[in-house]
Amino acid sequence: MMCYICAKEGQFDSDAVAVCTICGMGTCMNHTIRKDIDVWEGGYPFPAKKLPKKMPRMFCPDCSAAFGKGK
């Protein structure tokens, strides 16, 4: 799979190293944004507690901007 953003820019030699967690776009190292997201434990209607460890997630630039800073 090639990096979608690079291919759109006419560069067809960038392999994708990740898939965006939100939209599924393949991205290369230059376009992949890693964020560590809080994990919550508990049930409906509200999570009971935040777990001590965070979950790593990979995003494309557009979804990263839409998702925010991942506080």
Image (cartoon, grey):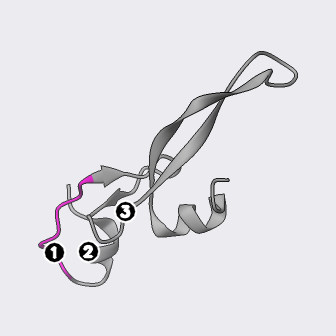
Q: Secondary structure at mark 2?
A: helix
Report the front residue among 35 and 8: 35
Quickly name the residue at label 3: 32
> Where 36 falls versus 30 (above or below)?
above
Task: Indicate which disc residue 7 carries.
Answer: 2
Tell me if 52 is positioned left or right of 60 in this view.
right
Q: Which residues are magenta?
A: 11-17
Q: Residue furthest bottom?
A: 9
Mark nearest the camera among 3 and 1 is: 3
Residue depth check, mark 2 versus mark 3: number of the one nearer the observer: 3
Residue 35 location (% of width, % of height)? 50, 53
What kind of secondary structure does the magenta stretch mostly adopt? Answer: loop
For residue 16: magenta? yes
Q: Secondary structure at mark 1?
A: loop
Say the numbered circle drawn on residue 12: 1
Name of the residue lying farthest toward the right: 45
**Residue positioned 55% across, 62% down in the render:** 64
Mark 2–mark 1 Cα distance, whole angstroms, equals 5 Å
Instruction: Say whether residue 42 is left or right of residue 55.
Output: right
Q: Is residue 13 left or right of residue 44?
A: left
Q: Position of residue 61 (x, y in %)?
A: 48, 69
Using the rendered view, name the quadrant where residue 46 is placed: top right
Q: Are marks 2 and 3 in contact (CB under 8 Å)?
A: no
Q: Is residue 25 above or below residue 13?
A: above
- Residue placed at 88% from the left, 21% from the top? 45
The local crowd at label 1, few if under 14, some if 14 to 19, many if 20 or more residues have their Cα within 10 Å, is: few
Residue appearing at x 83%, y 18% in the figure: 44
Q: CA distance from mark 3 to mark 1?
A: 17 Å
Task: Name which residue type carries label 1.
Answer: Phe
Do callouts 2 and 1 mark residues in contact (Cβ within 8 Å)? yes
Q: Amino acid at mark 2?
A: Ala
